[in-house]
Image (cartoon, rainbow, N blue to C red):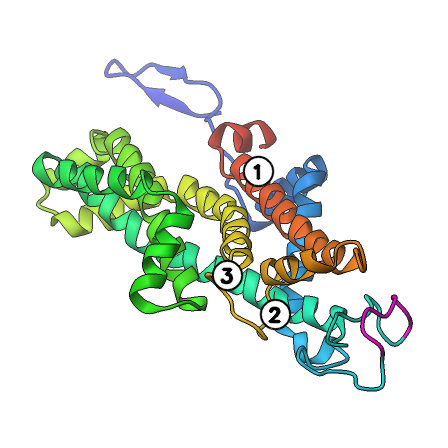
Amino acid sequence: MSTNSDPAGSTFDDGPALIRPRRTRADAVRVWLRFMRGNKMMMIGAALMLVIVIVAVFAPLIAPYSYNEMMTSERPFERPSASHLFGTDNFGRDVFSRVVFGSRISLGVALVSVFFGTLLGVPLGMLAGYIGGWFDSLVMRFSDAVMSIPTILMAVAVTAMIGSGLRVVILTLALVFIPGGARLARGMVYSVKEREYVAAAKVIGERRTQTLLRYIFPNIVAPIIVQATLRLSAAVLAEATISYLGYGTQAPTPSWGLMLADSQVYMWQAPLLAVFPGLALVLLVLAGNLLGDGLRDLLDPKFRGSLQ
């Protein structure tokens, strides 16, 4: 209880002081654990993604055979067994080993393409939203032009210029993802740049790049992370589609989309050839969607406030 004196010398009681407890690291951990307990779908998505990442990183240790090793002593289209968990394909190659090595292609292409698409699109969108004028119009018209071209047609055009292969898939998907990142960053910058702290930064003479990086970017990074996570699923499906049509990964390199394309010829003879790579695609896309939805809830200030 604190007391103050007035000019006449009398004292008065101003009541108990307001003390706001400081948040510690333990408080943050408790909030995180409470969120994880209440969001089981994100836990499932994170666990699936972790398993797929481990399989992709340690593929040479997990796969019992090389992805291109032909079993001359085995018949083609062997059924699943202890020696070949997913059976063998038409060349006598172990399907399980090819699915394991294929995770490197699908996950690697998705991560690289989303990374470069975000790395190029977000700065463009931030500059467009902050500068405005003719630069904003130029970036938005470029985004409209790219978004008007279907992904497959762009893959065909890039193939005609530089040939087929993984670089075609990565370049195509990176170009496709640039407009989405640019539009999201531009919209977020428009909603933030008129805030008081940005105006104060301009008054004290902060340079444009410093204002963008120190005051604006930290306040728009959450939706950018969520969008990039959700884009992983779209990139996985796009890579599988491009490889399925023959413009992406080329044989004998294993890709889940290419394995699906090869298996369609033997659909009635060996239907399991399509089941295992297709199931792997479903699990990876499901993991990306669940993880993205969970991150969206976690990074939402209103949701965090309700937990705290």
Label 3 element class: loop
Q: Earlier in the sequence, mark 2 or mark 3?
A: 3
Say if mark 2 contacts mark 1, CB within 8 Å.
Answer: no
Q: Nearer the viewer, residue 244 or 301?
A: 244
C-alpha distance separating marks 1 and 3: 32 Å
Residue 273 on image: x %, y %:
75, 60
Quarter holding residue 161: bottom left
Q: Nearer the viewer, residue 272 or 44?
A: 272
Q: Which residues are magenta?
A: 75-82
Numbered disc in front, either 2 or 3: 3
Identify the amino acid type marked 2: Pro
Callout 2: 10 Å neighbours few (<14), some, many (20+)?
many
Identify the amino acid type marked 3: Gly
Please say whether residue 130 is visible from this viewpoint.
yes
Residue 96 on image: x %, y %:
76, 69
Q: Which residue is mark 2?
A: 254
Q: Nearer the viewer, residue 215 or 79?
A: 79
Q: Which residue is mark 3?
A: 246
The quadrant of the image that shows the C terminus is: top right
Residue 307 on image: x %, y %:
60, 31
Magenta span main SS = loop
Q: Earlier in the sequence, mark 2 or mark 1?
A: 2
Identify the amino acid type marked 1: Asp
